[in-house]
Image (spheres, rainbow, N blue to C red):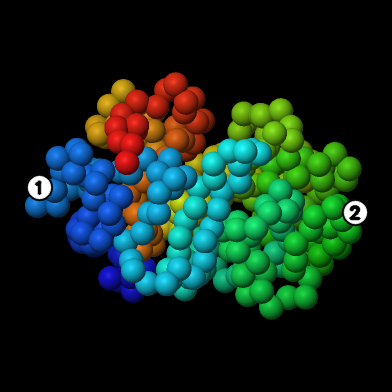
Amino acid sequence: MQENIFNIKSEEAFTKIALQTFKHQFKNNKVYRSFCDLLYIHPSEINKIEEIPFLPIGFFKNKKILSSTDKIQETFTSSGTTGSTTSKHFVTDINLYKESYLKGFSHFYNHIEDYVVLALLPNYLERKGSSLVFMVDDLIKKTNNIESGFYLDNIDELAKKLITLDKKGQKILLIGVSFALLDLIEQHQFQLKNTIVMETGGMKGRRKELIREELHLVLQNGFGVQKIHSEYGMTELLSQAYSNGNGIFKTPPWMKILIRDTEDALSIQAVGKTGGINVIDLANYNSCSFIATQDLGKIHTDKTFEIIGRFDASDIRGCNLMVL
């Protein structure tokens, strides 16, 4: 099954594999099975992906979400404030994650070997268990370029390298958290011609939260680029969506976004309506592929989507249906 997900070429193929994955996880994932049982939902009654139950993402904080009995190879953890409970994603097949992010990146940006990757991810580097650092570290290695690397506090060195390589015509991917990218352009000004600037979101309490349009405008001016790219991923997923500007995201063929009604978590919204983001990530074959996130967004007619914000804790309805 896993090897088939990266060969999906049509909606029909996606639906077929998603339904098969649902049956597999219903049978083999105890937490997900209990959730479905409480909803009185059984695979025999499910014919469309919109009918599949989406597990609230909060379950990754206090339950072992596994659909496999294989040995755990990696445990990814979310960032969190001191004392808060963090999510844990137990990965029994790390090669599935690697294949997902490598094929996902090449789907949107072509060969990683064409780039120098410069990573500005200070808050992720300062802790263990980040799936983002794992991915970016591997992308850096796959460039086979000595200029690629991580940066923590050496902002001046990064700025110098960025300007030098960009002037030489080298294709660069500068990937960083929002607050760190803002720190960089406050200390240095750029006019980049060959660089993709990609933000991974998150002020993490380091700065005042900005709306996307405001953040991207500041970054565009600071880096001298026309568009700011974005990556949408999370600890609980093994796939990423990407935006090449304006906060409009696209998913790889094995990932799909559905929007749920904020008042009724089991109802799927029509195109263009704002609601909670549900993710189908078929790379999550050994955990749970059907996740109800705490993000708000909407889907467009061309199947692209955008993030509007996040649920306030008091806004989450229907997600706390079950406490095991």
Q: Position of residue 273 (x, y in %)?
A: 35, 28
Question: What residue did someone put label 2 on?
Answer: 156
**In the image shown, does 185 or 120 lie closer to the viewer?**
120
Do the residues under discs 2 and 1 have CB atoms within 8 angstroms? no
Residue at left 81%, top 49%?
191
Farthest residue in the left direction?
Answer: 44
**Pair 2/1: label in front:** 1
Q: Position of residue 183 (x, y in %)?
A: 81, 41
Q: Is residue 314 left or right of residue 301?
A: right
- Residue at 47% across / 45% down in the picture? 61
Q: Position of residue 59 (x, y in %)?
A: 40, 44
Q: Quadrant of the C terminus?
A: top left
Q: Amino acid at mark 2?
A: Asp
Q: Is residue 305 above or below residue 31?
A: above
Judged left or right of residue 243, residue 320 is left
Total number of numbered discs in the rendering = 2
On the image, the x and y values in percent for residue 136 come to 63, 63
Packing grade of label 1 (10 A; few <14, some 14-19, many >=20) is few
Q: Quadrant of the N terminus?
A: bottom left
Which residue is found at the position 66% from the left and 29% from the top? Answer: 210
Whichever of labels 2 and 1 marks the residue nearer the N terminus, that label is 1
Residue 146 visible somewhere in the drawing? yes
What residue is rendered at 69% in x and 78% in y?
144
Q: Residue furthest bottom?
A: 144
Task: Give the side of residue 225 with respect to residue 268, left or right.
Answer: right
Instruction: Give the quadrant of residue 173.
Output: bottom right
Give me the C-alpha separation between circle 2 and circle 1: 59 Å
Asked which quadrant contains residue 302, the reply is top left
Q: Label 1, on which residue?
A: 45
Q: Is residue 103 visible?
A: no
